[in-house]
Amino acid sequence: MEPEAKESDSEKTSFSPVVREVLVQNKLGIHARPAAMFVKIANRYESDIKVEKDGEEVNGKSIMGVMLLAASMGSKLKITAVGPDAQQAVEALVNLVNNKFGENQ
């Protein structure tokens, strides 16, 4: 049993976190539709994804968590991913936020 536990521990720590900060740019902030888009993209990736705003961190794969951040226009988000596809996950999520979640405002 002990070697398995050590292997699991090393798997968790073998990936470095990928962290990016981004500003919410769409006029209405992260309401239901942008939150759903964020979570849909986050769930495409194996990595663990966290989103932080003003010191409050939530699971980036949870629509309720993302909505509870109540991120309005101008809010700074810190997106952190850890896992085999962390870089791709963070890039996709940063692009989504930078593109105003596809909204014109």
Image (cartoon, rainbow, N blue to C red):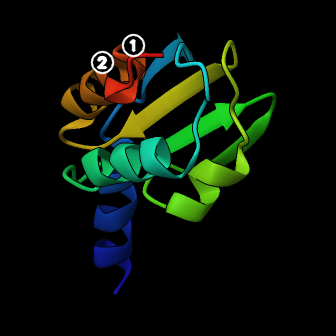
Residue 51 spot, x, y in % from top left: 57, 38
Q: Judge by depth and name the residue closer to the eye, 99 or 41.
A: 99
Residue 21 spot, x, y in % from top left: 54, 14
Residue 48: in sight, yes or no? no
Amino acid type shown at disc 2: Asn
Q: Is label 2 in a helix, a strand or a loop?
A: helix
Residue 16: in sight, yes or no? yes
The residue shown at (29%, 76%) is 4
The residue shown at (71%, 53%) is 68
Specify whether 30 is left or right of 41.
right
Residue 11 spot, x, y in % from top left: 29, 54
Q: What residue sits right under mark 1 in the picture?
A: 98
Specify whether 14 is left or right of 56.
left
The residue shown at (65%, 34%) is 52
On screen, residue 88 above or below 75: below
Q: Judge by depth and name the residue closer to the eye, 7 or 97.
A: 97
Amino acid type shown at disc 1: Asn
Q: Judge by depth and name the residue closer to the eye, 105 or 97.
A: 105
What numbered label is drawn on residue 95?
2
Q: Are marks 1 and 2 in contact (CB under 8 Å)?
A: yes
On screen, residue 98 above or below 68: above
The residue shown at (39%, 13%) is 98
Q: Is label 1 in a helix, a strand or a loop?
A: helix
Residue 31 spot, x, y in % from top left: 58, 44
- Outermost bottom residue: 1
